Amino acid sequence: AKINLSKNSHVQHLSMKRLATMGSSCIVLSLAEAEECRAAVTDHEGDGQCDNGTLVILGDVGVNYYLNKRDIYVKEQLNTCGPMVLCIHGNHECRPAHIPSYGLQDWNGGQVCVQPEYPHVMFAVDGEVYTLEGRNHLVIGGAYSVDK
C-alpha cells in the first residue's frame, strides 16, 4: 500500500482503493498503479468523484514503447479512464516529439504533446513548468536508454 503524503497535500500518492474515492485532485502513479486506474475509475463513472482531476504517470508510461497496436490499446484505456492524464516520459519510450501525429497545445501554464484522437492523454515537455493546484512543477523526464 502507498502512503497518503498528507491530508491536504497538493499531490497525493495513493492506493487504488483510495483513488476511487478522491475528488478533484492531482494523483501521481507508477505504471503498475496506472494499469489499475481504469477499473478503479470505472467503478465510479458518472458519480462525479473522479471528474476534473489530473492523473500524473511518472516515467516509462508504456504508451510509445512498441509503436504498434499495444500502444494504441494503452492510449485508449488512459483516454477513457476519467481524469486528464499527464505522462512524464521515462527512458524506454519514444519521445512524442519524434512521432508526427503529436502536436503541441497549451495546458496549465506550459505546453504538452497531444494526439488529437487521445485528447485526455498528454505528454509533458521537458523543461516546461505546469501549475497544478496552485503550485508550479518543473518537468524533466528520463534520459534516452540504449537498453530498449
Image (cartoon, grey):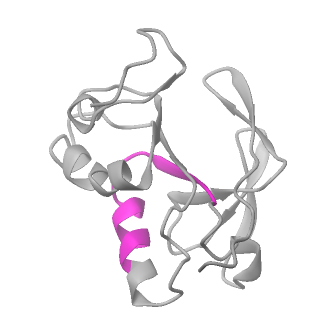
Q: Residue at x 20, y 33 (%)?
A: 17
Residue at 76%, 56% (x, y): give it: 125
For the C terminus, which image quadrant? bottom right
Q: Find residue 96 and report its image quarter.
A: bottom right
User: Where does residue 66 sit, x and y in percent of width and height?
Assistant: 50, 85
Asked whether 76 or 47 is in front, the reply is 76
Farthest residue to the front: give it: 147
Direction top: furthest residue: 7
Whether residue 21 is in magenta: the answer is no
Q: Position of residue 63 (x, y in %)?
A: 50, 71
Describe residue 26's horizontal placement relative to residue 18 as left or right. Answer: right
Tell how many labels: 0
Residue sitting nearer the eye, 66 or 137: 66
Q: Residue at x 44, y 48 (%)?
A: 30
Location of residue 64 with respect to 139 vertically, above or below: below
User: Looking at the picture, does residue 34 appear above or below residue 26?
Assistant: below
Going by the picture, which residue comes out furthest to the left?
43
> What quarter of the picture does the N terminus occupy?
top left
Q: Position of residue 136 (x, y in %)?
A: 75, 27
Bounds of the magenta span?
73-89
Residue under the point 42% across and 55% down = 31
